Image (cartoon, rainbow, N blue to C red):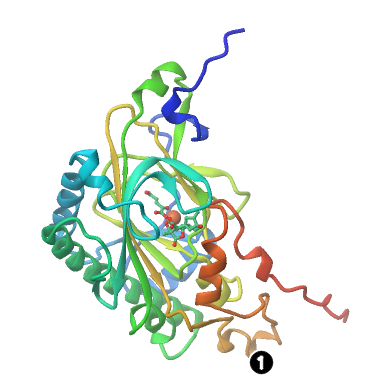
Amino acid sequence: MVVLAKPPALEQISLLRSPEPGDYFAGIPAVDLAAPGAARAVVQACERFGFFKVVNHGVAAGVVDRLEAEAVRFFASPQAEKDAYGTASPFGYGNKRIGRNGDMGWLEYLLLAIDHASISKASPAPSSSLRDAANDYVGAMRRIARTVLEMVAEGLGVSPRGTLADMVVGEASDQLLRLNHYPPCPLLQSLMPNCSPTGFGEHTDPQLVSILRSNSTAGLQVALHNGGHWVSVPPDPSAFFVIVGDSLQVLTNGRLRSVRHRVVVANRLKSRLSMVYFGGPPAAQRIAPLRQLLGRDRDGEQSMYEEFTWGEYKKAAYRSRLGDNRLAPFHRQLPPAASP
Ligand SMILES: C=C1C[C@]23C[C@@]1(O)CC[C@H]2[C@@]12CC[C@H](O)[C@@](C)(C(=O)O1)[C@H]2[C@@H]3C(=O)O
Ligand SMILES: O=C(O)CCC(=O)C(=O)O
Ligand SMILES: [Fe+2]
């Protein structure tokens, strides 16, 4: 038997089975935010998958292209220059190390904090041109996040419509922008053609929503709510993907569930570049099911979660490993339903 050793650069990175080329899941819903009935479509997509793509979003291609070009330029710059913006703790440049608890992936990234509507002055943006491009991009992502969350509220019958959206776009909200670059890994792929490095290990996002845009290189996979089977998401650089996060799961008492997702680096030639906006609430925001979702009309439904603030959740999240179920410690033991 021949035992193949992993190249040293990959020693701490787990391998995944390479997806078959072009083997994409065709069922990801596409929601036209401008179409009649969009609110219902958003809620349905969130309930079924915790994930969908937004089309007809009105974001000018120039806004996306400019940030992508800045990101490509930054990631192509000499390693020593990039390291000057590291080591992502928590913000700045990071290489292979994700978070502080030993998670590793085949990627490099830039993680930037957002202060209300623009990149925080405290975040080390590599250039003023990247900062300007990121600010325009963040403006566009905040508009999508607001619309999506207003539609979630409307579709679930929660009023006012801004109940969820205000948590994310209001003053003191906790938003992030992450630029991820996944270079190809031809060495491994020629040694072990059926294996690919993990780019970003499986996880759920802790915030309310994340809005993800990538170039045309595939790699994102999501776990289906129905059975947990991993499926490959067809890339669509003209669209934005919405990811339901843990906080939205709790706020809706589990009606919407956060989606596990990961990135597999299977393309032998082309880099994947993703730009992800994370919409989180202010630190003091209480994260508990919205009262209207527990009201009398909902048959005395009880909260499935212990109460916490976003600040408390975030602190716990940042002590956890990427793949942990971060909501598990907050699940309530409910008394068995009374028999009729
Ligand atoms: C391993 C980790 C990285 C992460 C913080 C954590 O301890 C657990 C959650 C991770 C995550 C996933 C979604 C986002 O990419 C992120 C920025 C976030 O808010 O939570 C990352 C964190 C990170 O990379 O610092
Ligand atoms: O790069 C991607 O497509 C996914 C990245 C991701 O899940 C994250 O940054 O949290
Ligand atoms: Fe994520």
Residue 309 picture quarter: bottom right
Would residue 273 be found to the left or right of residue 294 on screen? left
Residue drawn where x is 37% and y is 21% of the image: 187
Q: For mark 1, what is the residue?
A: 296
- Residue that protrudes farthest toward the top in the picture: 1
Residue 121 picture quarter: bottom left
Residue 77 picture quarter: top left
334, 184: nearer the viewer: 184
Residue drawn where x is 39% and y is 35% of the image: 265
Near mark 1 (Cα within 10 A), the count class, few <14, some 14-19 or many ≥20, is few
Name above or below for residue 217 compared with residue 212: above
18, 325: nearer the viewer: 325
Residue 156 x/y as whole percent = 50, 80
Would residue 84 be found to the left or right of residue 22 on screen? left
Quadrant in the picture for the N terminus: top right
Name above or below for residue 235 compared with residue 36: above
Q: Does the rendering let one see residue 103?
A: yes
Residue 35 x/y as whole percent = 30, 71
User: Which type of secondary structure does the marked residue at label 1 adopt?
Assistant: helix
Question: For the residue marked with disc 1, what is the amino acid?
Answer: Arg
Would residue 274 be found to the left or right of residue 325 on screen? left
